[in-house]
Each structure stands twice: as structure tokens, then as C-alpha cells.
Image: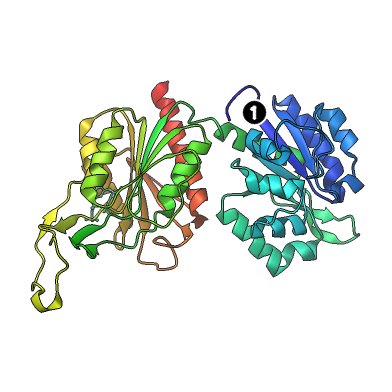
Amino acid sequence: MARGKPVIVVGITGGIGAYKSCELVRRLQKSGFCVKVVMTEAATRFVTPLTFRTLTGEPVAVSLWADEPHSKVHHISLAEEADVFAIVPCTANVIAKLAQGRADDMLTTTALATEAPLVIAPAMNTHMWRKETTRRNVETLRTRGAVFVEPGTGELACGDVGEGRLADVNAIADAIEVEARRCRDLAGAHVLVTAGGTQEPIDPVRFIGNHSSGKTGFAIAEEAARRGARVSLVTGPVSLPDPFGCEVVRVQTALQMRAAVLARFSSADVAIMTAAVADFRPAAMSAEKIKKTDAPASIGLERNPDILAELGGMDSGAILVGFAAETTDVIANAQGKLAAKHADVIVANDVSDPSMGFGTDHNKVYFVTGAAVDESPVLGKPAIARDLLDRVAALLEAKRG
Ligand code: CTP
């Protein structure tokens, strides 16, 4: 994806704010981006495709039923070319379609097909913006990682005064630029991620395991790949599909995870250990299923190697990030792990709250680095991945000088 000028695909939907997208396109071009435009049919009632074709010098995509011949299916090529996909203005209807994954025109098809970060600048009547159903749709998209540039307050086209006006064009352009910079800040880096929980077999049908869903590690791997990194994801058994653009190694036990990590660590610039590795494994695995009639009174356990601590002991120069799931003394325990495992960052969270962390889509974390502790708000796991990788990218840049 990374070549030449970064490509911003601007999606325009049917609202009076569509005319402000002309200014947005100009501002993005001045900032050095290649801008391509896709419009809904309704948007063309407010501003003509010719306006944007003239501004961008590129064909404007409106219909799925190609008015312009293309070598490749147009919505797919636009989706692949996009470094950032920005929808400005975005109506309540299109927000609802995106939240549902509907794809019934050029713009929503492109949005569904793209792996690029999504920036959404809503504009609508105050009541529509405040409606519970719109709030829920916005939250759904935020949880998946979409960035919203909140509408401003003022006089609306319908005559009402309130929230719903398209945000300031410069604020929208700034948000797009932040995402565009992120697209490349891990280019050239090899990022190794562990995810999920390990399973330590007792017999062929039973194991010692834990509640880890793998969602955080998968979100980090996907976001790192999107930002240009070569990503190796080593994961315990989870029910998540392979993230786009990553090497995925599926393992079962801590020993298998250790072997897969060590085989890749020498080339890694960054290692992010989100996996909930079982600290113990049964000392011996029964080759046959243990019948209840001859069940042992206890199962002997052996310590598993601590993979993160082992990497920390190698002093390879890679940036090391560990996770700590705690139920008490969250910060103190995280600081202890930071020192003991020679990590650069520990991302700590309190797993005593069942609404967050394990298996859920949200989390609230503490980034612990040396003496500094930054507390995040409650965020969707993709947003936590983004925040963490911002920190990792800054550490990498500092290291590279
Ligand atoms: N970790 C690891 N290998 C292990 C255990 C943990 O690589 N055998 C990594 C985890 O992926 C995580 C960090 O170490 O990044 C912290 O794991 P955690 O289980 O919370 O800490 P422990 O050191 O095992 O301490 P405790 O279980 O006592 O809280």
C-alpha cells in the first residue's frame, strides 16, 4: 500500500455540508496527498461529480455499474489504494449502513472492502444525531476503530440550532493527516505479537486454559500491519480469523508458543506479548483419556518458561511490551513485572471488573513505563491497539535517532 503520495479517498454523502468537501479536497492536496473521490447518488444532488473531477483530476466514482472503464473492479481498487478513507459529510443513514456492514452503493461497498482507517465527519439534524439508534451506531463503529470528527454546534440547514453541523474543515483535515501519518510509521519494522491463551493438555480431551479471547493481540497485529510493519502473530487457540496482512502461527501450548516466538525474535524490532500464557503445565500428559474411575486425586504441575522474561534477558535491542492482567495493586504489580522482565512498557489492566478485559470488546488500561503511568479512558480494543502502537512508534523513532 505504501508508495508515492499517500492516497486519501474522500467519500461524500448527501448533505448540504458536501460543498465544504471541495475545500477539504484542496486542503488535503496542499498537504501533499493524492485525493480520490467517491460520492453517493444523493451527494451528487448537492455538488456535481464534475466539481470533484475538476479539483482532483481523477474520475469520480458514483455508480457500481461503471460509467468509466477501469482495469480492475473500481470499488476494490479504490479500497486497496486508500491509505485513509474519510467520509465527509457522513449522514445518519450512511453511519447506520456502515455499522451494519451494508454495501449497496459505490461508497458503502468501498468502505466495507477497505482495510484503511476510517475517518467519519457526521453532519445531520440535531435530533437525528442525538437519537439512541445513531448513538449506538456511532459507538459500534468507534469500537471497530473508526475515528469520528464530532459535529459542531450552530445553525443547521433545516433552521434548527444545535449539534449536527459538519466540523470545521481544518479539524477534519488534521484528523485525516494524523491517520495518514500513522499508516506508515511502522514501515520497515518487524513486529512480533503473541495472543490468546495457551492450552496445557492433561489428556487428549482436557486441558488447563484461561479466558483470553485473543482480541487485543489480534487488534494490535492488524493495526501494526496497517501501519506498514511486517507482522508475525503467534497465537494460542482462539476463534478469530487471521488478521489481514500478517504471518499467523497457531499453537496450543506455552512450549510451542515459546518455540515459535524464539524462531522469529532475532529479526524483531518490537515484541508485544499479549498472550495469557499458562504459568504451569501438567507434569505428564496422559496418552489416553482419563476415566473418572481412575481419576488421580491431584495433577502434578511443572512451571512453564516465561517467554517475555526470556526475551528481556536477551538484551536484543528490540522494544518489549508486556501485558499484565491484575485483580489487585494493578500499578505496583505492573511496575514489578516491568523491572523483573526487562520490558520497555507494561500494559496493565484490572480484570476484576467483568464488563472489561477478558472476552469483551472494551478495556481500560494503564501504560506503565519506568516511573510514568498513563491511564487510558475506556476504549474499544482497536483504539487501545492504536494508542499502544503510537507509543511503540515513538520509542522506535527515538531508538533509530
Ligand atoms: N508471559 C510470558 N510467558 C509466561 C507468562 C507470562 O510471556 N509464561 C507474559 C505475558 O504474555 C504478559 C506478561 O508476561 O505479557 C505478564 O504476564 P502475567 O501472567 O500477568 O504475569 P506473570 O509474570 O505470570 O505473573 P502472575 O501470574 O504472578 O501475575
| Residue at which label 1 appears | 6
**Left or right of residue 99: residue 265:** left
On the rendered image, what quadrant is the C terminus found in? top left
Numbered disc 1: secondary structure: loop
Q: Amino acid at mark 1?
A: Pro
Which quadrant of the view contains residue 181? top right
Q: Position of residue 124 (x, y in %)?
A: 80, 57
Front in this rendered view, residue 5 or 206 = 206
Front in this rendered view, residue 265 or 199 = 199
Which quadrant of the view contains residue 206? bottom left
Residue 203 in sight: yes
Residue occupying the point 75% across, 43% down? 11
Which quadrant of the view contains residue 27? top right
Q: Position of residue 387 (x, y in %)?
A: 49, 44
Above or below residue 298? Residue 21 is above
Q: Position of residue 195 (x, y in %)?
A: 36, 49
Q: Is mark 1 within 8 Å of ligand 1?
A: no
Front in this rendered view, residue 168 or 258 = 258
On the rendered image, what quadrant is the N terminus found in? top right
**Left or right of residue 136: residue 22:** right
**Left or right of residue 255: residue 234:** right
Residue occupying the point 31% across, 59% down? 326
Above or below residue 54? Residue 41 is below
Above or below residue 351? Residue 236 is above
Front in this rendered view, residue 104 or 130 = 104
